[in-house]
Image (tube, helix red, strand yellow):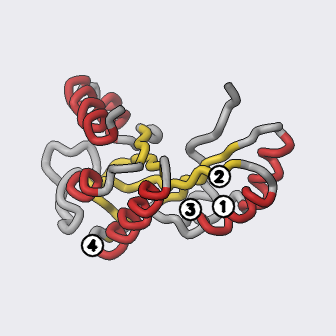
Amino acid sequence: MAFVHLHTHSEYSLLDGANRIPDLLDRVQALGMDSLAITDHGNLHGAWQFYAEARARKVRPILGFEAYLAFGDRRKRERPADAPGPYSHLVLLAKNRTGYHHLIKLSSIGFLEGFYRRPRIDREVLEQFAEGVIGLAACLSGEIALYLRQGNYEAAKASAQYFGRVFGP
């Protein structure tokens, strides 16, 4: 089984990514990799360019984005008192065409309904548009990691179980 980067930021991760898509694909090919996921923060702005260039180079493009998941209601600026932060990160990947369309919806909702410093979504819309989507725990700013860093094992376990139910087998 070949190694595939499933959490990669490009220049479309505003204030966070500097990798240009052609340069990423050059490196993927130089390393002999056959697939790559682009998971920019909160958006799919580079998805079309990435898809077209990857396909032209015979690299399998995996489309996704790193969502900002609000701990409370995406439409409210306040967060629950017990939340470990204003939001967490959650990597979302399209499993199929339905999943890609759901990622577009989720990203759009983040900008149109949940924007407060970041384009946030919440559990309500995540559950509504989870079909065809693969969820990954993300990074140290992911919900599970945030709870673990606080020493709150039970909350981390509950979060992992929740995401297991949402994205299921």
Q: Are marks 2 and 1 in contact (CB under 8 Å)?
A: yes
Element assignment for label 4: loop
Would you name the residue on which mark 1 appears? 51
First in residue order: circle 2 vs circle 4: 2
Element assignment for label 3: loop
As shown in the figure, which amino acid type bears the numbered disc 2?
Pro
Would you name the residue on which mark 4 appears? 113
Q: Position of residue 17 (x, y in %)?
A: 62, 58
Would you name the residue on which mark 2 appears? 61
Tell me the CA gap for discs 2 and 4.
29 Å
Q: Nearer the viewer's eye, disc 4 or disc 3?
A: 4
Would you name the residue on which mark 3 appears? 13
Tell me the CA gap for discs 3 and 2.
17 Å
Residue 89: which numbered mark, if any? none
When the figure is inspected, residue 20 is found, relative to residue 150, above or below; the finding is: below
As shown in the figure, which amino acid type bears the numbered disc 1?
Tyr
As shown in the figure, which amino acid type bears the numbered disc 3?
Ser
When the figure is inspected, residue 10 is found, relative to residue 142, above or below; the finding is: below
